[in-house]
Each structure stands twice: as C-alpha cells, then as structure tokens.
Image: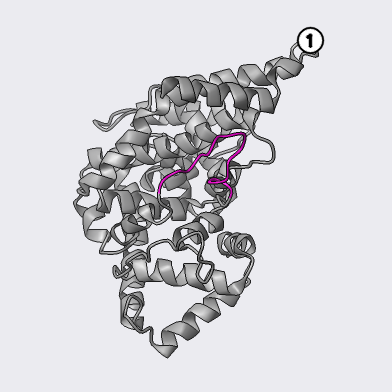
Amino acid sequence: MNGQHDFDDAVIEHCAAMGVQVTRAQLDRWKRAGGLLAAVGSAAATLDSDLAAAGQVCALVGELRRHRHLPTAVFALWLKGYRVGLPAVRAFLIKRARLHDEFVTEVRAAGFGDDVLPEAALTQVERMAGVRRRDAVLLADARARLGSRERFETVLRMLLDAVAGRYIPTPSPSPSVLARESEGRLLERALGLDHAREPLDGFVFLRDEPEAPLHHLPRLLSGEWSPSVTAASDAELLAARDALTDLVEVIRGVAEALAPMIEDDHFGFGALVSLVDETTPAEMALVVAGLLAARCDRGLTARIDELRRALPMLREVRAQAAEVVRLRADPTSADLVTPAKLRAAFVASLGAAD
C-alpha cells in the first residue's frame, strides 16, 4: 500500500509540474472508473513509470474538460491508444450498442424497408429532414451539401431502410435519363464526395458503380450489436479499435497525399477528414460496436484489410507530400511542383503502371 501511495504522490507531483493539479481522491476515483490502472502491487499493472502515469492523468483531465463525463473521457483515452480498464471500455460500448439495437427495433416497427412506407413513417422522415438543432451538425452539413429537402429525405429513407435491414439499392439510372438521381451519387454528395467522379486533368478518384457500396449498408447498420460486443474477447476489442484507427489514418493519409495535387479539395477528402474530426467518442463507440458485430462478415473484413494494407504506401506518399510543401516554400523550386504539374506526373505514372 505504501508503494502505491508513494507512486501516487509522484504522479501528483509530475502533474503539478505539467500545470495540472490533481488530488489523491481524484486519482482513486479515476482508477475505479478504469481511466488509470494501478501501477504498483497489482497483477494488472501496465504503466511503466510514474511519469507515464502523470502523462495519462493529464490527458484524462483534458478529455474530462472536453466531454464532462468520466466514462466518455476514459473511452476517448482508449481510442487514442492509452491503456485503460477494458471492463470500462466494454461497458461504454455495450451501452451504445444497446441504443443502436433499440433504434433498429423502432425503425422496423415504424415500417421502414416495407414496399409501401406507412404515412407515419413518411411523416417521421419529413420531421427529421426539417430538424435544425445545434447538436445535429452532421445532419445539417449533409442537408446543405444535398441542396434540397427532397434529396435529404431520400438519403434519410435509404439509411433508415438499411437500418431496418431491408434496403435494396435501386440500379443507377442511365446518364441519358434525368428523371431520377442516382442513390449512390446522392450519398456521396451527402458525404462531401460529389466531385470524386469528375475528372481532374484525366484523373478520376472513384470509378466503381455508385450503388456498389450501398449493398453493404444493411449488413453494416442493421442487426443486434450488443450481443457481439458482450461476447467479444479483450483481444477482439483491441483489434476493432486498431482497425478503426487504421481506417481513420487511411482517410487522413489520402487527404494529405492528394492535397499538393488538388486545389479546393476537389475530391472531397478534406470534407471526410472534417467529418472524422467532428465525430464524438460516443459516435466512435458505435463504429467500434459495428465493427465487432461485422467481424464475421468475410467480405467486409476483406475490404477493411485491403485498405489497411495500403497504409505503408500511404505513409510514404504523405512523406513525399510534406516534401512538396517544403519545396513550394522555396522560390527556386516552387514552379516545379505546381498542382497541375504534379497531377500530370501522377496520371503519367498511373499510365505507366497499367
């Protein structure tokens, strides 16, 4: 016990040196909540030193100031790779997964996914499309990108049908037919990727059928998630977090790699990065829970693994992009690395690879 007290005293002193004042009572409370593992006299000890523990305490204080909720702060630390109590992480994930499961039940009961949507469900979509709340930033951004309430209602109904597990994408219309907009293109537009299929000096980022990814939506969004989270091993929890971390790095990596070649975020990856940055820990918990629920879906896991395998290459390209930024700051080389010249070289390299 004395060893633990001495350790805690050292942590408190290190935190004070870092400008953060904490008390022993706070440390004890945070340990009970899983935010700080015991480092002395415990078989579960994982923190290497009192200095490392102080760094984690300061990070936890920062998350508490941001979220004002201890379980959320502990989960946010876990997402960032800190070693916290996994029972606390699992409890947070189960709570969010149960909210998802309750929502799925309500959506199915409302009739979403039926051939004819009940009038009450239509009214619900219309009400959601008109919601303007400060805490509905993501929906507001999507509505603004779509440009009309009717398009927004279409995307909402697609997603709710998928949550119900009954969504079947309508094939994309012929380019010569303008009577109906592509459902895949509408979702891309809602995400800020509406220009990703438009050529830029011969380069097109998205080339597959717009509706192709939509077939995965019911498997991603529907079903019960809480049993999967409850049954997952500690190793599977960590694997799901690592998969999410890698997917976020892929999004950031593509954005940073393309940035020197593209003006005005033509392909929309800057918007995707902003979407990730605005996601709360509670929303990230839903993503982790969804990954755990889908871990037996071989097709989905194969696609995720394919993206993760691209990380080493993306890291190299990001390093090259950083060098381009340095060269542009030098007047003697800036003209050699303009966006247009970089695009031309990139398109030529793709042609050579083919």
Q: Residues within 10 Å of mark 1 (few under 14, many from 20)?
A: few
Judging by the rendered image, the residue that carries numbered circle 1 is 332
Residue 131: tell me if it is visible: no
Q: Where residue 342 appears, x then y in whole percent?
A: 63, 23
Q: How many numbered marks, from 0 up?
A: 1
In the displayed orientation, state which residue is furthest to the bottom.
Answer: 119
| Residue plotted at (36% across, 53% down) | 212
| Residue plotted at (60% across, 76% down) | 130
The reply to whether the magenta stretch includes residue 170 is: no
In the displayed orientation, state which residue is furthest to the top.
Answer: 332
Closer to the camera, 257 or 347?
347
Amino acid identity at mark 1: Thr
Q: Is residue 265 left or right of residue 206?
A: right
Q: Helix or strand or loop: what does disc 1 sit on?
A: loop
Q: Quadrant of the C terminus?
A: top left
Residue 37, above or below 283: above
In the displayed orientation, state which residue is furthest to the front.
Answer: 176
Q: Where residue 90 appears, x then y in whole percent?
A: 30, 50
Q: Where residue 102 appears, x then y in whole percent?
A: 33, 71
Quarter of the view holding residue 220: bottom left
Residue 308: tell me if it is visible: yes
Which stretch did the figure color magenta? 195-208
Main SS, magenta residues: loop
Q: Where residue 255 appears, x then y in whole percent?
A: 56, 35
The reply to whether the magenta stretch includes residue 203 is: yes
Residue 107, above or below 11: below
| Residue plotted at (45% across, 29% down) | 53
Closer to the camera, 16 or 184?
184
Q: Quadrant of the N terminus?
A: top left
Q: Colour scheme of this structure image?
A: one colour
| Residue plotted at (56% across, 64% down) | 139
